[in-house]
Image: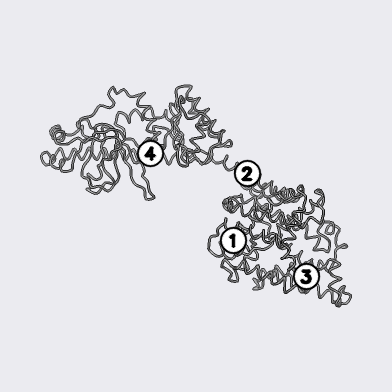
Amino acid sequence: VAGLLGGTRGLVSAPCGPAAALLAAVVMEWIGAGGVPTGEVPALLAVVVVLAGLLQVLFGALGGGRLIKFIPYPVVAGYLSAAGVLILVRQLPVLVGGSAEGLGPVLAGPPSWNRTALAVGLVTIAATLIATRLRSPVPPTIVGVAAGVATFLLLGLRPGGHFPGAGGLARAAVSGLVVGPLPSPLPALTAVGARFRAAAAIPSDHLLLAIPPAITLAVLLSIDTLKTCVMADTLTRKRHDSDRELRAQGVGNVAAALCGGAPGSGVSGATLVNVATGGTTYRTGALAGAFALAALLLLEPVMAWVPVAALAGLLVVVAFKMFDWESLRLWLHPTTLLDAVVVWGVIGAAAATNLMVAAGVGVALSILLFLREQVRSSVVARHGLGDQRRSKTRRRTREAAVLAEHGAAVAIFELQGNLFFGTADQLLGELEPHLEASEVVVLDLRRVRSIDLTAARMLRQAELRLAAHGGELVLTGVTASGEARRLHLLLHQVGLLGAGRNVHAFDDLDAGLAWSEDQLLARHLVDPKPERALSLGEMEVLKALPPAGLAVLERLAPVRTYQAGQALFQQGDEGHEILFVRRGRIRITAPLARGGTVHVATFCRGDFLGDMAFLDGRPRSAGATAATGAEVFVVTRALIDQASAADPLFGARFFEELGRALAARLRTTGDEIRALQEA
């Protein structure tokens, strides 16, 4: 069923050892401390598997395939190694001829061991390992079982052997050395209704006992499947659908439970054999299940002679393969010591209790690992001051000088990652030196993925400390729509945004920087008429021109007026004009390949734009829009050529001053790039 519904090429699903170990531990607890009658156990186990399968379907429906893969590797390695430990603890006694109830037969020593069982088990282990190393075309597990059966039969037929004659199988089954006669699977496959009735008869308090192991089993089977899916992807060079595979595995486990089968997952051993022999399609898993059913129906006489010690030997091999030996050696390196603590902690919890407790320990440790990484990584991506980091608003020489002198009063922090209780104190420590001295603190939250109540209240504390000496807090990347909506609502909820606060929110960092610069200029620059319309001769780039030529420009250059939001030109337009801003602000934007635009610069009165098309005659490289009501002088290339023909010195000085202004812009851009790299 899982093979028909799944979406991973070459994946084979089968009952897995960790699930068997988990259910064995669960049954022992039910019968012991839980007081569950042994007659209820089969039906209660079916309930566990059905619930686990339904949970897997739910995981897949909710996109849990991606989440389960994000469990830290040390937790997964420790969990699978812990399952290997439990398998060894239960199978080593069987290997020496005892029962799986404890290590007593092993610890009692060789005198109490059954030599026949031990010989069969050791031969099975050796044959399996040899077949694996030789890359036998026959699956190593079949080679191992065949070697174990052959050894058992040879030992039974030798002089003095225990099981000669036709009654040997019955006597071997009674003694517990072989599987023995198997009942026909057909009644079990068709007894679905009886299972429903048996489950309905279970008391409600006993049904509650099925919930914890079902959750653990669902997680265990999902992890084991997804781990195998990643391996199958590597072999087939394809990509699996995690959510689809979880849904398929869940439906498969529900179907198995209804038919009396064991829970399973995508298993690495069978998948490796399948892909190695050419099984790289989606349907090979379904074919493997069909052949397994055929073997059960047609090969029952052969399977009855399989020694239990041979099966124990196979499980011992499986247990050792489950150990992540590299992870177990992490304690040898100081840099991975904490990861080793996680691995060994999960193993220790499983050995001391059971896999259910180990699962809880693993989840708790995964949370601790996440918190450790978050706390260790800085939430400040970049930090700088306003005398180095400027907005994209072009300022006049006097304004630029004021910003250079007083810009250090603006502290700029670009934040990243998650702001929560684990990183809030770290951020407060970074802000501490600036909360008492800075006039403005800018926090860019564009790269912040999440923020909790603790971090939001820390930001409010920072705002109060700034307000105590007249400082302002600026938050950027905060909008009331899109992905930042939740952040915007939370900041409103804690009272950080709203009327009467010393907090100002902007959509992007550049808008916040421009506002901060305006505040510095308002405090430190004396300009009685900041919005007075300038004459053409007052433009900084034109002040050094010969008066006669400048008079010609003032007489012939027209003035254009634009309303806020009106476009001056678009990217790709033809243009041979350079525009000098007489009043207002002009915003320059450039289109992005993925859609949308990026803010390139904002030009204020006294500055110029359109110089690239003016110089090289090519189409406009960006668009220009009036950010406020604006007026511009329009100087065409033809007008400059006319003035230069009448006065060659004028033309030379014009282009010299234009080149000087462009060089100053390049220097500013270089300083900004260097400041970003150093931050």
Please state which of the two labelled residues, at mark 4 or mark 3, is closer to the viewer: 3
Name the spot of residue 282 as percent of width and height, x first. Answer: 57, 66
Kindly state the secondary structure of the residue where label 1 is placed: helix
Q: Residue at x 29, y 23 (%)?
A: 527
Q: Amino acid at mark 4?
A: Glu
Q: Distance between the Cα atoms at labels 3 and 1?
A: 31 Å
> Label 3 vs label 2: CA separation?
45 Å
Residue 637 appears at what percent x and percent y? 18, 43
Q: Is 457 above or below relative to 117?
A: above
Question: Which residue is under mark 3?
Answer: 306
Residue type beneath disc 2? Ile
User: Contact (CB < 8 A) between labels 4 and 3?
Assistant: no
Residue 37 image offset from top left, x and y in percent: 82, 53
| Residue 321 occupies quadrant | bottom right
Q: Residues within 10 Å of mark 3 (few under 14, many from 20)?
A: many
Q: CA distance from mark 1 to mark 4?
A: 47 Å
Looking at the image, residue 648 sits to the left or right of residue 306; the answer is left
Q: Which residue is mark 1?
A: 231
In this view, the residue in front, 531 or 606, is 531
Instruction: Report the quarter where the C terminus lies.
Output: top left
Instruction: Give the side of residue 448 with respect to residue 198, left or right.
Output: left
* Residue that mark 2 sits on: 367
Given this view, does label 3 or label 1 mark the residue nearer the observer? 3
Three-letter code for the amino acid on which mark 1 is drawn: Met
For label 4, the residue is 672
Of residue 157 and residue 449, the one placed in the foreground of this image is 449
CB within 8 Å, label 2 to label 4: no
Instruction: Residue at 16% x, 33% y: name it.
Output: 554
State which mark lies toward you, 3 or 2.
3
Crowding near the residue tagged with mark 2, few <14, some 14–19, many ≥20 C-alpha atoms within 10 Å: few
For the residues labelled 2 and 1, the Cα–Cα distance comes to: 26 Å
